[in-house]
Amino acid sequence: MADPSNTPPVGEIRAPGMDHALYPFRTAPEAPRFAWREGGRIAFTVTLMVDYWELTPPADARPDPRMGSPLGKYEPDWLTWSQHEYGNRVGIFRVLEMLDRFAIRPTAALGSEAARRYPEIVGELRRRGAGFMAHGSHATRRITNAMDEMDEMILLAECMEAVQTAAGEAPIGWCGQDYSHSERTPALLAQAGYKYITDWSNDDRPYRMSTDGLLSLPAQSEWSDIECMWHRRVAPQIWADGVMEAFDVLYDEGGACFNLTLNPWIMGQAHRIRYLGDALSRIMGRKGIWKARMDEVYWTAAEQI
């Protein structure tokens, strides 16, 4: 039974129902149905993770503990490192070729160290008209509350500069490593000149953060290849079915975004790439799909919120 002492008086606005004030609470019926460009019923985007994985991260790095070797923790971990390197040597080119078949321009979440180390990859992305988001520094270094505020400010500025140097234009979006933040990150991103983030999986439609001008665009990690096929060990054909079913629901509802996040070291493997094609073939068979880069989604959504 509810505690009557916690029930607000009639007419009083209830508490937001969250443990933070980074954005206002809203329910699905309150969310707008966005009118997308080209008469699109749904906005379809692909986020392509372009990372640099360190063989021996520094002692104060905070990598995802789930990304280690099944053989245990040891250094140097050549097995895990080489699995990740496969994405930048081989896998990303398979993924790009598959996206080309469907005329999809991805948005690259580009880490600053990857921006410096892989000019060949950046060149291939630019040639295809891809968009770019800043993506932290290394895949093995997450932002948390343990980071000093000044260090975080410097990092956000350095990431923007590195992507601008490599891609030819300053990124307006941020995709954190492993979707990680400190409590200060949204405010610091806005101060640094970023316009949107893609780290929150709590909605299928864009919404405004509490910081001035910053928008949250859907992360939708539930059908990310790394979440499904690496962490949950979902078979690739089952992953493809899930992607298609999720898209069908959002398409029928209308006015939402569909963000497909791909990691080249996972999806670019020879035994998985065909299932990306299977999913895209079914999705692109529907009418009224706006294939967009993430920055295009931002500009269109910002006009309607």
Image (cartoon, helix red, strand yellow):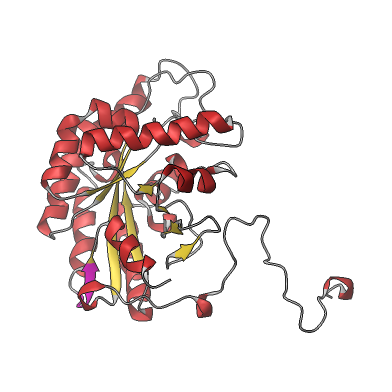
- Image quadrant in which the C terminus is located: bottom left
Q: Residue 14's spot in the image, x, y percent? A: 73, 73
Q: Residue 192's spot in the image, x, y percent? A: 44, 42
Q: Write the residue at 45% across / 42% down.
A: 178
Task: Using the image as rendered, state which of residue 188 and residue 109 is in the foreground.
Answer: 188
Q: Residue 285's spot in the image, x, y percent? A: 17, 73
The answer to which quarter of the image holds residue 204 is bottom left
The answer to which quarter of the image holds residue 243 is bottom left
Magenta-colored stretch includes residue 222 = no
Apparent side of residue 207 relative to residue 292 in the rendered image (left or right): right
The image shows residue 128, relative to residue 74, as above or below, that is below
Tell which residue pokes out farthest to the right in this image. Answer: 5
Magenta-colored stretch includes residue 287 = yes
Question: Magenta part of the protein: which range?
Answer: 286-290
The image shows residue 168, relative to residue 44, as above or below, that is above
Q: Main secondary structure of the magenta part?
A: loop
